[in-house]
Image (cartoon, coloured by chain):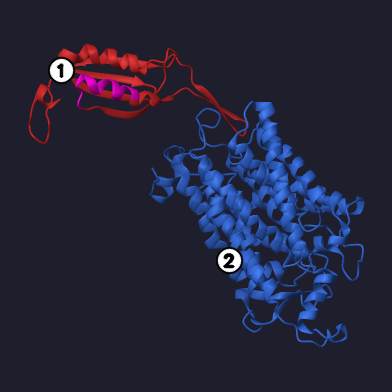
Chain colours: A blue, B red
Amino acid sequence: MSRNRFTRGTAALSAAVLTAAPFASAFADDAPAKIDSGDTAWMLTSTALVLMMTIPGLALFYAGMVRKKNILATMMQSFFICCLVTVLWMIAGYSLAFSNGNAYIGDLSRLFLKGIGENWDKPFTLGAGTDNSTAQTVPETVFMMFQLTFAIITPALITGAFADRMKFSALVIFMTLWSLLVYSPVAHWVWAPLGWINALGAADFAGGTVVHINAGIAGLVCAMVLGKRVGYGHDQMIPHNLAFAVIGASLLWVGWFGFNAGSAVAANGRAGMAMAVTQIAAAAAAIAWTFAEWMTKGKPSVLGAISGAVAGLVAITPASGFVLPGSALIIGLIAGVVCFWGATGLKHMMGYDDSLDAFGVHGVGGIVGALLTGILAYGPLSATEAAKDGVYIGGGALLKAQVIAIVATIIFSGVMTFILLKITDAIVGLRPSVDEEREGMDIVLHGEQVF
Amino acid sequence: MKLIMAVIKPFKLDDVREALTPLGVQGLTAIEVKGFGRQKGQTEIYRGAEYHVSFLPKVKIEVAVPDSIADQVVEAITNAARTGKIGDGKIFVLDLERALRIRTGEADDEAL
């Protein structure tokens, strides 16, 4: 039985088996596996919800925070990454992430989704042929699509760090390389049956390391390598329309139910618990950020409230299938305050221009969430036949695995992002000219304007 | 003829229009503008980044009137736009050389 988030748990597995052979478990091994329509329906829905997080959710969230000369360029980044990563995923990304391969990366056996047509109406087994395989109750097309939406949002999150100042040609090259050489390997480490972080026993239910720490650190490196926006610290860089950002953050929140509850890869009790803790952590973090800001800056800002909600959603992501509601409240409150500090204190202390706080919210929130998962994981939620008390039990051992997973992701993502930026810089250059940047990315890069 | 320009607080626009109608003023142009004066701006904070916004939103109105009612118009605008607090705005009066109604070709006082 796999020790990753796709672990179905005893109850879920027997439920699936019963669907196929309702007589007795003795026949279970012989029974032909069947696609579960309930599970599949939920995963189809979750996939659509997670795609909605990027387009239009993240696109609106980010576009509302930039200046009016950069609205379209910012939305285009999310939209085009959606298209780009879809094609890359189909060609090679999925194979590199989820074929068996070795502990560090998948192989090329599934290029162009090879073989997906042969078993189109059969349930998918992740890691078939390994002794750590996980039988699912959904077809591979659905699993592949669900994972694709995660591969899309992760690079899109990074764009918040270098908003207003990256050439589109540089974005296309950098994100192509990053998706294949950073996202796919880290997803493989954590979620593929042979991945080394998976084997280590680190808990990451829905992508705290793979998505948020990965994107957050990449964003930090981007902000440092590209440098500050022209006029940073002098010009007014007031968000042009926070109403966009409120709509975007709200779409992210709703979409996150697909992200977290969908990561159960089934319509079951874990999915229900994941949804409950997601809601609680988001709300608690929004309240925590709002009050922290109210007390230190004098006013409870709308941008603060929505930023806090996103911080809470980020922090609960790795924990969502493993913790109970009380823990979610704690995770949310801590994430709200710590990310408030990350976006307002840490950033100015360190002096980098993380324009829309990709690191301050996703990097910091991801680390907080991964650590607290190590402390607060409730065993029975991840119980399996082999581990009746649970695969993930909060405490010293799990916390140690979490720290290793966090540090490995930070180092790999940081170093690779730096190298890929330098390669991109050598090919096309990363930034437009100062005059072009002053004029605005919309007209310079795309020849269009909103206002 | 005089061209009277006034920069006023945005929420006073309707009051000013209502005050001018009884004087026989037939038309008025209003423009949303930003400006600064003795009224200090405001501080806005976005995720800890503080911006001092010195340009505040105002409405600028332009109204062309015959010489005979120019003083009354100025007085009416003053009374309608005043709150007594800093930032109430200013009124400028300029001599106007010509006026023409495009549709009919009427000129000067008849065009106002």
Question: Compared with residue A73, is residue A148 higher up or lower down, i.e. above or below?
Answer: below
What range of the chain is rendered magenta?
A: B15-26
Q: CA distance from mark 2 to mark 1?
A: 72 Å
- Whole-percent x and y of residue A177? 60, 59
Q: Residue shown at 79%/44% (left/top)?
A: A330
Residue B66: assigned label? 1
- Whole-percent x and y of residue A33? 75, 83
**What's under tag 2, amino acid-wise?**
Leu
Seen in the image, is B64 located left or right of residue A67?
left
Seen in the image, is A260 located left or right of residue A254?
right
What residue is pinned by disc 2? A88
Query: Does the stretch in magenta take in A221?
Result: no
Q: Residue shown at 88%/53% (left/top)?
A: A394
**What's under tag 1, amino acid-wise?**
Pro
Sort mark 2 into few (<14), some (14-19) or many (20+) by Cα contacts within 10 Å.
Answer: some
Task: State the image quarter where residue A38 is shown.
Answer: bottom right
Question: Compared with residue A329, is residue A22 higher up or lower down, i.e. above or below?
Answer: below
Q: Nearer the viewer, residue A105 or A161?
A: A161
Question: Compared with residue B72, is residue A108 higher up or lower down, i.e. above or below?
Answer: below
Q: Are marks 2 and 1 on the same chain?
A: no
Labelled pair 2, 1 in contact (Cβ < 8 Å): no
Residue A141: assigned label? none
- Whole-percent x and y of residue A55? 54, 56
Chain containing mark 2: A
